[in-house]
Image (spheres, rainbow, N blue to C red):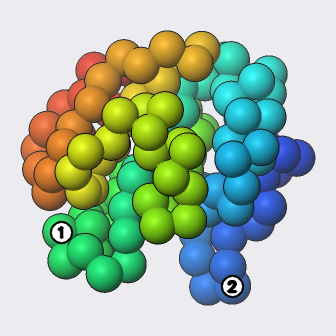
Amino acid sequence: MTTNVDVFKPPRRGYYWSYYIITSSQELESALAHPLAQTYPVVLMFWASWNEPCRVMMRPFRAMAVAKRRAAIFCQVDVDKFKDIVERYRVEALPTFLLLKQGVEKGRVVGAKVGDLSNIIMANI
């Protein structure tokens, strides 16, 4: 799998190339329709910078993104910027992680639960 997905903008300077920061609702929609997203699972992390559990889960999320960068596409979605995406995926608590295969939800982890997140990712990727 190539890490250059043309529908994603590169992450900010200093961040890993193994995950992507969603910058618009249209970008997420076109990314999920992209052939790579139809082939590989997509892991979405819904987060907020002011939320302590989200900040705690950033390191494990990045580590999983690096470890599985050739097996899945990892994305971050800021809940404060994209309320429509939050409503569409029924995100009610932070952090929330979704595993999508061909656009269909295959797993969900709510809260700072590294073990649960790891189990869902390992079982589905």
Q: Position of residue 112 (x, y in %)?
A: 14, 57
> Could you give the CA–CA distance between mark 1 and mark 2, rounded to whole angstroms?
23 Å
Seen as rendered, the residue at the extreme bottom is 14
Instruction: Tell me the amino acid under the disc marked 2.
Output: Arg
Write the residue at 14% across / 38% down. 116
Q: Position of residue 67 (x, y in %)?
A: 43, 50
Above or below, 58 relative to 112: below
Residue closer to the observer: 33 or 115: 33
Q: Residue at x 19, y 77 (%)?
A: 52
Marks 1 and 2, the one that precedes in the sequence:
2
- Placement of the N terminus among the 4 image quadrants: top right
Q: Quadrant of residue 31?
A: top right
Say which residue label 2 marks.
13
With 74 as the anchor, is 117 left or right in this view?
Answer: left
- Above or below residue 112? Residue 68 is above
Up-down: is 28 above or below 108? below
Q: Residues within 10 Å of mark 2 (few under 14, many from 20)?
A: few
- Helix, strand or loop under label 2: loop
- Residue 13 falls in image quadrant: bottom right
Judge by depth and name the residue closer to the eye, 41 or 89: 89
Q: Is residue 60 left or right of residue 71?
A: left
Q: Which residue is mark 1?
A: 53
Q: Residue at coordinates 70% horizontally, 61% vertically from top-left?
A: 23
Name the spot of residue 20 as percent of width and height, x first: 63, 57
In the rendered structure, are the residues bearing label 1 and label 2 in contact, judged by CB atoms less than 8 Å apart? no
Residue 62 shows up from this direction: no
The quadrant of the image that shows the C terminus is top left
**Dot 1: what SS?**
helix
Q: Is residue 100 above or below residue 75?
A: above
Q: Tell me if residue 24 can be seen.
A: yes
The residue type indicated by label 1 comes to Pro
List x then y, in percent, for residue 7.
Answer: 84, 45
